[in-house]
Amino acid sequence: ADTVFMPSPLAHQLGFLYGLMLPVYLKASVVLQDTWLPEEAVAIIRAERPSLMLGSTPFLADIAEQAIAHGPDLQSLTLFLCAGAPIPSPLVEKAAQNLPTRILSAWGMTENGAVTTTLPEDDPERAVHTDGVPLPYIELKVTDMEGNPLPAGQEGPLYMRGASLFVGYFKQPELYGVDDEGWFPTGDLARLDEQGYVRITGRSKDVVIRGGENIPIVDIENTLYQHPKIQTLALVGKPDERLGERLCAYVTLKEGEESLTLEEICAFLTERKVTRQYQPEFLEVLDELPRTPSGKIQKFKLREQPLQGA
């Protein structure tokens, strides 16, 4: 008898698995929104009365904001499953003030779909401070750098295994790093508590998460290195209240080049078929990038550096 509301693209795991496959399994109705416009979402929810909505943190932020003025139109939403980035506590409080919605926090990857979720019967604070417990037929472990399991509360690389794990990358079998016991290295750092709830604490893979979507930094950097004006560059995420992170490009220019604009960079990426959400939103041109004695760019220093053009 439920109706699912899905505003995420069906080309993503979230949209495909839970906007297309989940309603089939539930024998439920589903309402899809083609382009995310918060005001239009309010009209859809008022008309279609969905009870379940799934999306990343920016969707929840926009719905919570709309609920201030349009709370009566959104009362059918009883469950919002939020994935892709940590949920700020003020956002949960804002949603709770105007909506009857229970907010669940989930975590997963394209390689295995949803892996963990908080539960409807959990205290709402669980959704703020954890990313949930493993779904049925899924196991997690946190290890030290030598692969030895760590006790509860300690941070280390996160591994998963289970029924939803993929069987490999298309035409890239060498990247399939699952060991003989079926453990898959997620590339994330995490800690597990005594009850088995996980908290993702960082990323060992070089990615930025913008609006719940992983940006493949290495691929974008490799593309930008082809720009005729760029000598060196580094892409890093900058904290953002709504989207979690925004992408910033730090570059140095080749000798003889005097200027480079963000518009030039984005036009260059667009010509090479790089989707807009993967393109930088800020650009800083520096005389040199911070480096280690061995020459490696120190991205942590760039993350800490304030944006001059923000």
Image (tube, grey):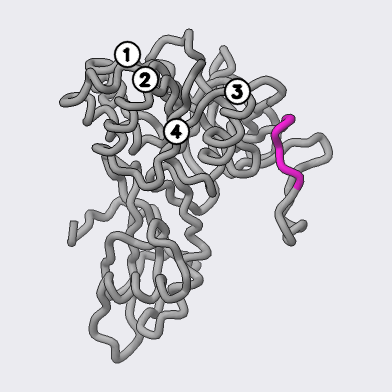
Q: Name the residue furthest left.
A: 69
Number of the front mark, 1 or 3: 3
Name the residue: 24% across, 85% down: 258
User: Does residue 87 show up?
Assistant: yes
Tag 1 near tag 3, CB within 8 Å: no
Earlier-in-chain disc, 2 versus 3: 3
> For the residue carrying disc 2, how many other residues have a C-alpha within 10 Å: few (<14), some (14-19), or many (20+)?
many
Cα distance, mark 4 to mark 2?
A: 13 Å
Q: Name the residue furthest front.
A: 47
User: Which residue is labeled 1 in the image?
Assistant: 100
Tag 1 near tag 2, CB within 8 Å: yes
Cα distance, mark 4 to mark 1?
A: 20 Å
Residue 263 lies in what quarter of the image?
A: bottom left
Mark 1, secondary structure of its residue:
loop
Residue 77 circle label: 2
Mark 2, secondary structure of its residue:
loop
User: Which residue is labeled 3 in the image?
Assistant: 27
Q: Position of residue 24 (x, y in %)?
A: 62, 29
> Which residue type carries mark 4?
Val
User: Which residue is labeled 4 in the image?
Assistant: 31
